[in-house]
Image: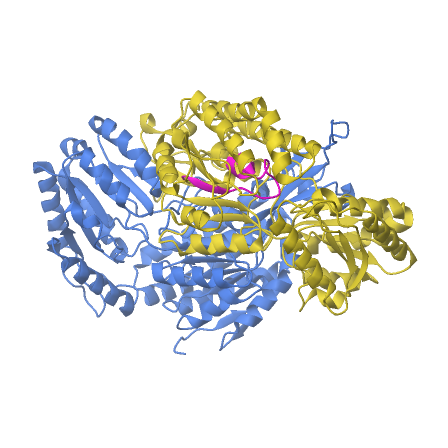
Chain colours: A yellow, B blue
Amino acid sequence: MTLTAHSIIAGTEAESPSVEAGTTAAAEAFPVYRATTPEQRGAFLDSVASEIESDTDAIVEAAVSESGLPEARISGEVGRTTGQLRLFAEVVRRGDHLGVRLDPALPNREPLPRPDLRQRMVPLGPVAVFGASNFPLAFSTAGGDTASALAAGCPVVVKGHPAHPRTGELVARAVTRAVAAHHLPAGVFSFVLGEGTELGQELVRDPRIKAVGFTGSRGGGLALVATAAARPEPIPVFAEMSSINPVVVLPGALADGDVRALAEAYVGSLTLGAGQFCTNPGLLFLPTGADGDAFLAAAGEAIANAPGQRMLTPGIADAYSAGTARVEGTQGVRVIATGQAGDGEHAPAPMLSEAPAGLLTGTDVTDEVFGASGVVVRFEDVEMLLPNLERLEGQLTATIHFAPDDAEAARRLLPVLEEKAGRILFNGWPTGVEVSHAMVHGGPFPATSDSRSTSVGSLAIERWQRPICYQDVPADLLPEAVRDDNPWGLRRRVDGELE
Amino acid sequence: MTLTAHSIIAGTEAESPSVEAGTTAAAEAFPVYRATTPEQRGAFLDSVASEIESDTDAIVEAAVSESGLPEARISGEVGRTTGQLRLFAEVVRRGDHLGVRLDPALPNREPLPRPDLRQRMVPLGPVAVFGASNFPLAFSTAGGDTASALAAGCPVVVKGHPAHPRTGELVARAVTRAVAAHHLPAGVFSFVLGEGTELGQELVRDPRIKAVGFTGSRGGGLALVATAAARPEPIPVFAEMSSINPVVVLPGALADGDVRALAEAYVGSLTLGAGQFCTNPGLLFLPTGADGDAFLAAAGEAIANAPGQRMLTPGIADAYSAGTARVEGTQGVRVIATGQAGDGEHAPAPMLSEAPAGLLTGTDVTDEVFGASGVVVRFEDVEMLLPNLERLEGQLTATIHFAPDDAEAARRLLPVLEEKAGRILFNGWPTGVEVSHAMVHGGPFPATSDSRSTSVGSLAIERWQRPICYQDVPADLLPEAVRDDNPWGLRRRVDGELE
């Protein structure tokens, strides 16, 4: 193993990772951790955030060095990661995620009495989380999947991404310190590190693991989904995988707006972080006509002036170059502009190309190219646009640029985009995902393997839970969440109505 | 085809079913149906209930004749089915299932402003529902899966169960009348009928189908799960499959109670409806000692006096006989009592047997035998009981019989049973599933293929939904559910807090 960082199994650093030691400790920790009160769990999540902050300098240094991403971006990502932990702490303390429902007994109901029924959500069990290459903090060791699973009451075993092992180790140590400070069982958190895919496969096969969170490639995600489904006890996988995030520019947005500024903003989103965002706007629909021509010319100019940025790993840069070559080599595709390769070994040039609408099916022009490669498709009117949107696969985001004149067209596009994407934006760019209660970072396949949830925002907690009903359980045996005296002060649903 | 009833494809009766016609009509109906208001959808669900009631006599006659179940049971099931539809209508009108969250824009936030974010749940798309053999109404054509999918805004294509084709046809006609009366697209509901498994497989493979609901055998459920996972676009399957519903009788329940009455109540639950309940108590843990001996003797006596009842189909009766033969032939198993075979051709005798705890792993004694076959395992103390419970697969229900003296033991069992089951009962029997808000008819695999939901009760609606986030969408383009003026009067979460 060439990694220069350690695995941390239930509080103990180890040169070589033992998946089984981590999952065994997680399974042992589960009964204790699941029984923590909202206050205890909230305080622990807050501590994880504080422990990360207390080591910010070292974490930022490691992450900048390992990822090649700018310091400002990484510092922002630290804040995003700790902010998400604190948001989840707030949600856990409020306890709404427990989804409590009470249907009181109706002993005199005819023809049959109704028993006393009480429902709450419980955690699924130990969760395996796979760190992402492109967000060494916010989608990695203590990122959204880990934070939401811990919030739900699930111990976590993280498979660190080999592109940023030291960053992962530092964050894992921070989580481990918080576990110890709160006198939780050490198995609440483990971090295993290794090259190749076998370690991750072993983790997903392990019978103690009850769910999986993943952010990465379509191939990687589907491999884990297949492994999870083939287990004697299949388990749910939330894999966030592949999205080209279509953007539709409607005519009014060009007629009413500053076309050059809009084109530059597009290229800014396309090339941000070397294009290594799940929400990168890889496909843009642009009106035919002079305004569209002007937009395309300005975008081409901006691309030509955009330097290549160092990508996360040489492998990712190679895949990007193969992807752009594939797009470029597709008959009918015209390259609009190519930027300059950047300094260093894996900083390939951004590329902007144009494809006729007919290429959106039957070719792989719409397969995600991870990096700063954008494809533009021209359209004459909404009639032509709609079937092209309908043919797209599921997406994380869909964006419309419009002016008030375009309202009728936007109204027709909206329901089609709702069937395709987890987030719909107007007059903005999809890169940048707010961490809040109403966010959805999810969407129909292949954007994710399970469109019914999100990997960002407080709804993400619900991925790791299942409901239990208590029927005629004696009062002094009931869990606090469903007790008559409501010691946690939860908002509860009684006979279907919120108290 | 030997079935004597018709398929009904989008309002039109057909001798031979066309899956594609049904799914095409469903896909065409989806954009219109998903856009119905809570009031429109609630009124439609109420109408489905009324239309079923208007044909109660014919439906009861058909279902009694096809299933062999008693008229009182079938009449009760009609009421349960219509009651569930009306409960879902109430939930839909209230709109809580839309799960609306609003995070208002923070234009002055530093370092970056927050956009306006609004979240609501939307329906997944057309749903395939498989009718169950054992509940010709409540888990079939207009049963829980169909009612919850329609409530969520999903068109439904039902694959009727060939054991009760006429019942299915009559109910399908009732739904079809309601669709027409409410001027909804005919494709909102279709009903296809056929022998064998190919029709169902074709339905699950169809790209227009976006989710599947199933109640039936483990083999049948897993076959559909595999097909759904192998699609180019995999889709979620909620399959309710296999459960032996463990019951633990604690010593106090015997010492304090009427042992004979308790034993008779057990046999009553075990033999109810020829034991053809998903929640049939197939495994009972009984204390060693004189009280346990007395319980077992009384239960054996009750079984010996219990006549075999006609099972749903000859095939189900054959599978039951093979199952009981398998249990009887397992080395170490002792048959306590066998009842009398009933009149007619497929009314096999109930059976009660005892197995040593050691047989709970490594043999198939714990595989579900669908029918009136119970296995009793004796235990000396909770220490011996716990590992046996931990070894069980996932269950729909787990039951404890106890008296106040047993509180300490029950307290230790509860968290273990919470990890195994979707519903936990005290001092009752698991057969009989209340339709209400707090009910859970679900549980860890293999009780279901997805423990995160339920197929009975109002939480079932959420199976067929996914979240969408609207970012900076202009006010006049927003859907009603997330508009500032809240025209539907929904309870909404603003910055995470319920209004």
Instruction: Residue A487: say if magenta.
Output: no
Q: Is residue B488 left or right of residue A1?
A: right
- Residue at 14 percent across and 32 percent down: it is B255
Rendering coords of residue A447 (x, y %): 60, 52
Asked if one can make out residue B46 in the rendered structure from this viewpoint, the answer is: no
Q: What stretch is highlighted in magenta?
A: A125-146
- Please tell me whether residue B307 is drawn above or below residue B196 in the rendered image: above
**Residue nearer the viewer, A429 or B487:** A429
Q: Is residue A403 left or right of residue B336?
A: right
Q: In this view, does B20 lie to the left or right of B222?
A: right
**Residue nearer the viewer, A277 or A83:** A277
**Residue nearer the viewer, B463 or A235:** A235
Asked if one can make out residue A293 in the rendered structure from this viewpoint, the answer is: yes
- Please tell me whether residue A51 is drawn above or below residue B416 in the rendered image: above
**Residue nearer the viewer, A479 or A46:** A46
- Residue at 28 percent across and 29 percent down: it is B411
Rendering coords of residue A320 (x, y %): 67, 54
Among the 4 quarters of the image, the one containing residue A183: top left
Q: Main secondary structure of the magenta part?
A: loop
Among the 4 quarters of the image, the one containing residue A186: top left
Question: Which quadrant would the C terminus of chain B be assigned to in this image?
Answer: top right
Rendering coords of residue A144 (x, y %): 56, 37
Rendering coords of residue A336 (x, y %): 82, 58
Question: Which quadrant would the N terminus of chain B be assigned to in this image?
Answer: bottom left
- Please tell me whether residue B408 is drawn above or below residue A210 in the rendered image: above
- Residue at 22 percent across and 70 percent down: it is B345
- Residue at 40 percent across and 63 percent down: it is B223
Q: How many labels does the image show?
A: 0
Instruction: Residue A132: say if magenta.
Output: yes
